[in-house]
Image (cartoon, rainbow, N blue to C red):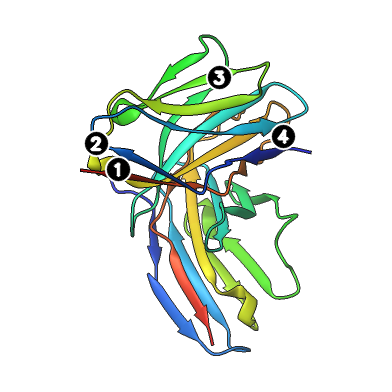
Amino acid sequence: AQSVAQPEDQVNVAEGNPLTVKCTYSVSGNPYLFWYVQYPNRGLQFLLKYITGDNLVKGSYGFEAEFNKSQTSFHLKKPSALVSDSALYFCAVRDGSNYQLIWGAGTKLIIKP
Amino acid sequence: EAGVVQSPRYKIIEKKQPVAFWCNPISGHNTLYWYRQNLGQGPELLIRYENEEAVDDSQLPKDRFSAERLKGVDSTLKIQPAELGDSAVYLCASSFFQGAGDEKLFFGSGTQLSVL
């Protein structure tokens, strides 16, 4: 069965420091991996995706994510955090044969000035 | 470009009452999703439409939930009767599905339902 784990409920980072939000997954075939962000009182927004190719994918707002097949991980990263990055981040996975997205529980990212 | 529009933004009802949510997807998007999101959890798919056809409704509690997508555009999700456990945020999303499964979803702001 497909599953996604976001092991941290909350991540606290000082502004200007690098940030990482962790995601691990389990699928039966080749994974399609996504990150979405949810700002307060706003809908979920697409950040980036990995389908195939280069393991490092770049997305919106300076975010990037690294696909690691051996560790079944897809961690979200940013070199220098901004206070405005504070939001709820969701990882999602879909295997190549099933169109249903499975979502993680979300990680609250707090960036402190 | 207008985004996915949902209404109402908030709804408070008493248990056993009916409730309906409306969604207008992005123009040209052929696929529409209804999700339920409980506090502290990720979205859970209720139903997915491709054009007018409900292609995945396996997680829709059909004894009390129903949905329709008129003419492959707007959609309505209904609960009748509502139960206390239905309190959640109901999200609508749309996408342009071309068969690969890698398309990004565009979400509305959601309807926050409180059942008292």
Q: Earlier in the sequence, mark 1 or mark 3?
A: 3
Q: Which residue in the protein does label 2 denote?
A: A15
On the image, the x and y values in percent for residue A43 come to 39, 52
At label 3, counting other C-alpha atoms closer than 10 Å, the crowd grade (few under 14, some 14-19, many 20 or more) is many
Q: Earlier in the sequence, mark 4 or mark 2?
A: 2
Q: Chain of mark 3?
A: A
Q: Which residue in the protein does label 3 denote?
A: A67
At label 1, counting other C-alpha atoms closer than 10 Å, the crowd grade (few under 14, some 14-19, many 20 or more) is many
The circle drawn on residue A98 is 4
Quadrant where the image shows the N terminus of chain A: top right
Q: Going by the image, does A113 lie left or right of B69?
A: left
Which of the two residues, A85 or B68, is positioned nearer the viewer here? A85
Q: Nearer the viewer, mark 3 or mark 2?
A: 2
The circle drawn on residue A33 is none
On the image, the x and y values in percent for residue A64 come to 40, 23
Local SS, label 3:
strand
Q: Please say if the residues under marks 1 and 2 sit with CB atoms less than 8 Å apart.
A: yes
**Amino acid under disc 1:** Ile
- Same subunit, tags 1 and 2: yes
Q: Residue at x 24, y 42 (%)?
A: A83
Work out how far the residue at label 1 is from the one at label 2, CA to CA, in angstroms: 6 Å
**Amino acid under disc 3:** Phe
